[in-house]
Amino acid sequence: MTALQLTDLTVRHHGPRGPVAAVDGVSLEIPPGTTLGLVGESGSGKSSLARAIVGLTPVHGGRVLLDGREVRARTVGDRRRLGRLVQIVLQDPDTALDPRMTVHQTLGEAATVFHRLDRRARAERVTALLELVGLNHRFADRLPRHLSGGQRQRVAVARALAVEPGLLIADEITSALDVSVQAAVLNTIRDLQRRLGLSMLFIGHNLPAVCYVSDAVAVMRHGRIVETAPTEALLRDPRHPYTRTLLASVPSLRTSLPDEGPS
Amino acid sequence: MSLPLRYPRSPMAWATAAMLASLVVLALAGPLLWGAAADRPDPAAVLQGPSAAHPFGTDNLGRDVLDRVLTATRPSLLLALAAVLLGATGGILLGASTAVVGRRARRLLTGLINLLLAFPALLVAMFLAVVFGAGADGAMLALAVAGVPGFARLAQTLAAAVAGTDHLASARVLGLRRHRLLWRHVLPNIAEPLLLSTTTAAGTALVALAGLSFLGLGVQPPGYDWGQLLNQGLDRIYAEPLPALAPGLAVLYAAVAFQLLGEVLAGGVARRSPAPRTPAAPIATSGPATEGLVLQVEDLTVELPTPAGVIRPVRGVSLSLRPGEIVGLVGESGSGKSLTALAIADLLPDRARISRRTLRLLGADLAAMTPKERERHLATGLAMIFQNPASALNPSLRIATQLTETVRTHRGTSRAQALTDASDALRRVALPPAVLRARPHQLSGGQRQRVMIAAGLMVRPSLIIADEPTTALDVTVQRQITRLLSEIRRDTCAAVLFISHDVALVGEFCDRVAVMYAGTIVETLPADRLSTGTRHPYTRALVASVPNLTADRDRPLPTVEGALPEPLAPTPGCPFESRCPRRRDHCTEQAPPLEGLDAVHRVACWNPVAAEVVAS
């Protein structure tokens, strides 16, 4: 379990007309063992935020604190210290896994980043990791192209969990999946939260999916957090007009179509 | 040589293999068989022309030119290969490492590669050959160094693609060390194209090395390679062309062999999926037209040849739309919903083969038309809206051109009239007429999709097929687009076929829903029955697996266990049978037909879910 605290985090990208603040002074907190959902539309800066936390994107201002200690990712040594605490699972199931490595090789490599394991211990660890994400150990010998999108994303989750991080960041991991497959991945995430007591940052644009796995939800727009609230409170009583627009835009089979008026 | 085994039918592969084998044999055996003869001077036969004893003549010491050319195979090939291997290794390491080093180092390396590329390779090689000193090793090293920038740039470009992948980002976050990232994750994924270009470069290096030797910068006497021999023979090329031509031909032969090898390997990579063409389906007229239907499709089947065999991603689909109706076609990836739409619009890839009992648009039989008539009928009666508005619009043309193109071509509308119509169409999708002068990149994703809809409206279509039109858009924009389609339907009475994987969206915005699974329609029902009145087990599972905002977070979401049936080995039974909780023995034997439960609800299932309280 790891606590994450962001204070005034700013990330800039180079745009055609000078630097653009993708993340603009964001402050967030994830208490240990809880899941924060982060929703927002494309271009709102969700992914830049996630990548900045794990050191894939440079931070231009503000602080990232993990368990109260400042995070740096300048050298490989820094990154290895960071990697033991935080891991990330990314969006695209097509490139999530190295196409030339079997599941066993991928997971074995991740499991031996910080520990030496002999052949048998490694095989056991791979089996345990696959079981953790609800996959049969027979998947170990497959190449990514012989896995479905949902299975690939679950292997990617297992790879991230191989180093036993305290915080897992899931960046749109179900966005490219079919609904029935998304349901299975969301169930896996719920299960992991219970069994491992992980802290999580679950990023997505699908509000129902994010709410399903999150204790609290932050709504992001144009690089800023416009509202943060416990999930039930946010659904019951959204304060910010943008949050209300988002909630109203979610198609649902169980409510009737709102009156068609000017948008 | 595994080449001819992998591509046994290609004569070029066989020829290449034979040429390479001959080169290898010559390089191995040449010096042993002819080495002694090649170095034996014969004062009695100096500077002779071709004869029976010396087919290519002799040189100024009376040595046999043919023997010398054959013997020179080994040094010529070895030097060229060494130069290429050294240059490729250096260049690839330099270029590929840009994917794994830090930001600052990457900028430095990129700058270095750009700088090196600014110098022409052959000039660099000649300059360095002089610096390193004339001789075989110097020339080889010079050529290797000169080849580095080219390989570095290629490797850098290829590695940049790998560097952008999620798996490399994950490997980085895992804390893998740089050399491991390079060896394990970058190089294996870019090896194939690099190997191809190395092969081709070997041919070039052979020629370049011969050139250096020819200029006296390469192999020095008494050593000799093909370039050297060419140099010696050239003095008397007007008197005796053959002694000069022989080494030239050898260079040509070897260079062509390497180039061909590159071609064959590249062709093998490109043709890894040789898809056989299928003959065109025999034209048959459609079944009888039903009055008052915009679209009438009966028993539509699409066959696609793949390397492993012919698959049938759409099997016996029947659909009909009335004017002003919005029908949702919902299914997950691989269900065949998009191919169904493409088949209706006659946009399937050439190798696909479609068969149908009936395919009528506005009552007119599309099967009975000539291709030209069909194109015209489709262009004026049907509008397609695609998933990705970014790639559906031509980035180099102004919106005005793209909107007016169809009506000016098919209806002969004047330019002024077409422009007036275009601004009307834009107004209808809530965009200002100023957008006419914009280019696609100046618009947002939602605006582009509106432009696509406006382009569709220009022809006043009777049918709009929207293939996942909102999937690439944000939820708030998605709501605007569906609302817009509803308004258009209301105003113009066009029918809309709305294709989506999002069952909640379809249920909310369509009148009627057809659910596809594994190429067949398993259920059609009024949209308001989706939440409680579904009868097919798949539809029910699909609806249940959608999380909604009120989902109980302490209970797992229902999922559909198992996977889609293998497309290459279709079973005679129900395609959903292996995943179905309600299957019976009968389900494996025969596929259930789509049968009407009542006037508006049809289901293809032997054992449908019992009806709950059906809202009427």
Image (cartoon, coloured by chain):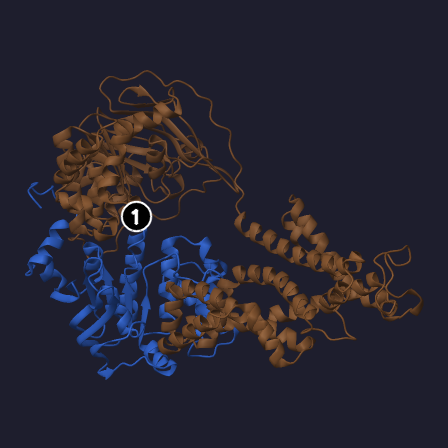
Q: Is residue B431 above or below residue B48?
A: above
Q: Which amino acid is tagged 1?
A: Ser
In depth, the one of B64 and A195 nearer the eye is B64
Q: Can you see residue B70?
A: yes
Q: Residue at 21%, 51% (x, y): give it.
A: B443
- Count all numbered tags in the image, as a single digit: 1
Coordinates of residue B175 in the picture (x, y in percent): 39, 76
Q: Residue at 37%, 54% (x, y): give it.
A: A149
Question: In the rendered image, which quarter contains the N terminus of chain A?
Answer: bottom left
Q: Can you see residue A122?
A: no
Q: Residue at 53%, 42% (x, y): give it.
A: B308
Label 1 sits on residue: B396
Query: In blue, which chain?
Result: A
Q: Is residue B106 above or below residue B463?
A: below
Protein chain holding label 1: B
Quarter of the image holding residue A209? bottom left
In depth, the one of B304 and B39 nearer the eye is B39
Q: Is residue B209 above or below residue B293?
A: below
The secondary structure type at the circle numbered 1 is: loop
In depth, the one of B357 and A102 nearer the eye is B357
Q: Colour of chain B?
A: brown
Coordinates of residue A7 in the picture (x, y in percent): 17, 77
Q: Is residue B46 above or below residue B476?
A: below
The residue positioned farthest toward the right in the image shown: B44
